[in-house]
Image (spheres, helix red, strand yellow):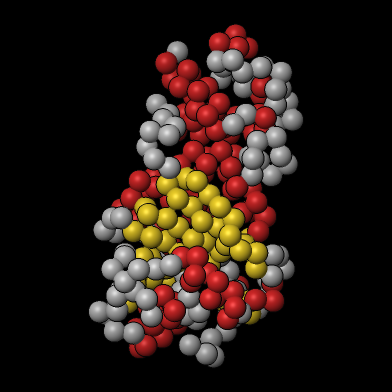
Amino acid sequence: MKGHTPRRRFGQNFLVDRGIIRSIIEVIAPQPQQIMVEIGPGLGAITEPLLERLDHLHVIEIDRDIVARLQAQYQPGRLTIHAGDVLDFDFAALPAPFRLVGNLPYNISTELLFRLVPHAHRLIDAHFMLQREVVDRMVAAPSTSDYGRLSVMLQYRFAMTKLIDVPPDAFRPAPKVNSAVVRLRPRAPHDLTVVDEALLGRVVTAGFTKRRKTLRNALEGVIDASGLEALKINPQLRPENLGVADYVAIANRVAQA
């Protein structure tokens, strides 16, 4: 897979550090008969060691040149290639349960994470390389500067763990930011149950659009102070002070009003 020029429009930064690659494979621990999907196989840094352990692998790739190289290198019995934009991919068409892995393009990572949320119940887990700043936001705890809409909406569906820090020099070309590998595992359905997930999204967005204001002001028009107090939530707190369960409780009370 040598000789390929990275394309900026696809956000291509290819992982080349063999030590990091080994560490990623170890934390993924693929098993032969598992259904696994790699997003953005690129030059095959993760693809090849995955196929050493898996009977079969699915990959999603937008770059036609890379698709052609993959088709020439691997037999269809070992590798199924889904050519196209991952943002247009129908994850519901995959047999479940499945696992996801990928070095996600930084320019689409947040949008892709939100698109995966509805498919959480069909996932075993996901291991993604992302901009470290995004990973820090994903796993952030309440009352911290990184905690926000992304934290709440992903933590509602997933238990997440930051696993490996990855420096820029692990890639070619080297990005201008640090990266990290994060694991996402779906929460059990009964852990937190919201009546209307779209409503939860609106409540969380309303709160973090005005994150420096008190809940009384940030959620004005969504729920009043007496409604918050009925949930044993102090209206003088700020949106960043509430945990995921608090937002679920607010959304459920609004839904029942």
Q: Picture coordinates of residue 79 (x, y %)?
A: 32, 77
Residue at x 34% of width, y 59% of height: 98
Q: Picture coordinates of residue 162 (x, y %)?
A: 59, 55
Residue 6 vs residue 1, the one in the foreground:
1
Q: Picture coordinates of residue 95 (x, y %)?
A: 26, 58
Q: Is residue 234 above or below residue 149?
A: above
Image quarter for residue 252?
top left
Q: Picture coordinates of residue 55 (x, y %)?
A: 29, 75
Task: Say left or right for 186 vs 138.
Answer: left
Would you say residue 187 is visible in this rendering? yes
Would you say residue 68 is visible in this rendering? no
Q: Is residue 195 above or below residue 36?
A: above
Image quarter for residue 192?
top left
Image quarter for residue 247?
top right
Q: How many marks?
A: 0
Q: Is residue 125 above or below residue 226?
A: below
* Residue at the outermost top position: 226
Residue at x 39% of width, y 47% of height: 120
Residue at x 51% of width, y 56% of height: 183
Q: Is residue 7 above or below residue 192?
A: below
Quarter of the figure with the C terminus: top left
